[in-house]
Image (cartoon, rainbow, N blue to C red):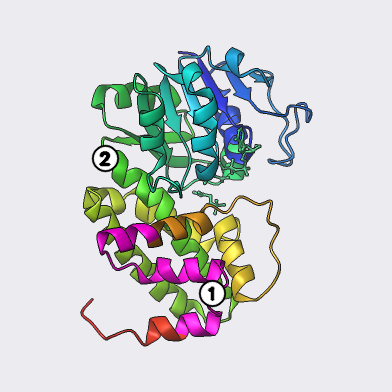
């Protein structure tokens, strides 16, 4: 099975390093001027088994293509290149909800490439950890159980352990929504509101993650698995997380580098639109969207969440 990774950001590069332990991997990037040392993943020199190319036609000859692009870039990329990808095994690593279509990456892939086998790779995993060969467990979600099993075997290594599910909706929503809650957790810590408040926002955030996911047809157990609770735990507790750090900057009114990929900001806006459409109450996500757009202050956001009507848990 030949493998290519499309997108040489931190995660695409880290996956290439991990999979190169099993055999040759092609890594496609728009710009390959960095040679064997990708500034998106500092301190890692690519092993020889990775073929780096800026020729998408060359990369797309592989039969398994991992799309490691940000969620808001995926639709535009597919609009330009779907013809090269259709019919392949396509695995998205994007953790977000497309703002214009209000869908996850699997629907974008299926719409653009109707003959492809579509899957999602998600779960708790920092690129730097994967690139260092630290043990990591992820979820491979594919609606076609046999295709999912084949992909699980193709993409697992001794240190990259993939569990599989056919619940693509649940797996990709877990990965997208945890980023929104991680921003909220970062805001709490950045604003000095304390660890107790963080535990509260993460738990209530998880409640609304499961509520929206259930409305969209996800299975509850998927949300309590690696792709949901697992990734929520990681992202809300680690300063390695860009979403958490962005939240910290918002909470402490510090500047944040706008070139950093922060999936949860756009996804919070997408979730706010979805929650209005579905009549599904998502107060933490709504507050993250308002904070990211500068519509409320941190003090107001905390007060608004604390003074909502009292209710059963
Ligand atoms: N970094 C991490 O630890 C993890 C990231 N992810 C997810 O993987 C996805 C990618 O994240 P990262 O690699 O970390 O982001 P990144 O910001 O490091 O890299 C994004 C890459 O996508 C490229 N790109 C953007 N738009 C493009 C387009 N239209 N065409 C071609 N290339 C384009 C950029 O040039 C860049 O190389 C995100 O959805 C993220 O949530 C998932 C698990 C872990
Ligand atoms: O998805 C991730 C870890 O599982 C990476 O999180 P950040 O995008 O917040 O860095």
* In the foreground, 4 or 261: 261
Apparent side of residue 312 relative to residue 22 in the rendered image (left or right): left
- The boundaries of the magenta stretch are 273-302
Label 2 and label 1: CA atoms lie apart by: 35 Å
Residue sitting at 46 percent across and 55 percent down? 267
Residue 118, position as x, y percentages in the image: 36, 28
Apparent side of residue 240 relative to residue 66 in the rendered image (left or right): right
Secondary structure of residue under mark 1: loop
Residue 167 bears which disc, if any?
2
Local crowd size for mark 2, using a 10 Å CA cut-off: few (<14), some (14–19), many (≥20)? many
Q: How many numbered badges does the structure rendering display?
A: 2
Q: CB under 8 Å between callouts 2 and 1?
A: no
Q: Quadrant for ligand 1?
A: top right
Q: Is residue 100 above or below residue 107?
A: below
Residue 175 bears which disc, if any?
none
Q: Is residue 262 magenta?
A: no
User: Circle 1 is placed at which residue position?
Assistant: 295
* In the foreground, 137 or 1: 1
Secondary structure of residue under mark 2: loop
Residue 67, position as x, y percentages in the image: 51, 31
Q: Is there any visible trace of residue 176 in the rendered image? A: yes
Residue sitting at 67 percent across and 19 percent down? 53
Q: Is residue 289 above or below residue 299?
A: above
Quadrant into which the C terminus falls: bottom left
């Amino acid at each position: 099975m030949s493998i290519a990774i499309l997108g040489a950001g931190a995660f695409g590069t880290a996956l290439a390093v991990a999979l190169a332990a099993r055999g040759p991997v092609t890594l496609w990037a728009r710009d390959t001027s960095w040679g064997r040392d990708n500034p998106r993943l500092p301190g890692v020199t690519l092993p020889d088994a990775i073929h780096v190319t800026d020729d998408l036609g060359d990369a797309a000859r592989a039969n398994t293509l991992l799309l490691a692009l940000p969620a808001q870039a995926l639709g535009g990329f597919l609009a330009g290149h779907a013809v090269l990808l259709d019919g392949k095994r396509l695995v998205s690593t994007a953790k977000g909800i497309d703002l214009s279509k209000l869908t996850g990456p699997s629907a974008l892939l299926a719409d653009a490439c109707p003959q492809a086998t579509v899957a999602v790779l998600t779960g708790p995993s920092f690129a730097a950890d994967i690139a260092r060969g630290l043990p990591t467990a992820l979820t491979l979600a594919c609606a076609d159980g046999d295709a999912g099993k084949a992909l699980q075997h193709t993409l697992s290594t001794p240190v990259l352990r993939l569990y599989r599910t056919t619940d693509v909706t649940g797996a990709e929503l877990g990965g997208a929504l945890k980023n929104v809650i991680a921003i909220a957790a970062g805001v709490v810590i950045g604003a000095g509101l304390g660890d107790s408040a963080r535990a509260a926002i993460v738990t209530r955030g998880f409640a609304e993650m499961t509520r929206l996911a259930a409305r969209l047809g996800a299975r509850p157990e998927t949300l309590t698995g690696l792709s949901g609770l697992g990734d929520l735990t990681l992202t809300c507790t680690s300063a390695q997380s860009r979403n958490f750090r962005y939240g910290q900057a918002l909470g402490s009114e510090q500047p944040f580098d706008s070139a950093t990929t922060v999936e949860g900001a756009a996804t919070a806006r997408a979730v706010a639109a979805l929650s209005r459409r579905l009549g599904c109450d998502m107060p933490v996500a709504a507050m993250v969207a308002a904070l990211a757009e500068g519509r409320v202050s941190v003090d107001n956001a905390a007060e608004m969440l604390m003074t909502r009507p009292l209710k059963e848990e």
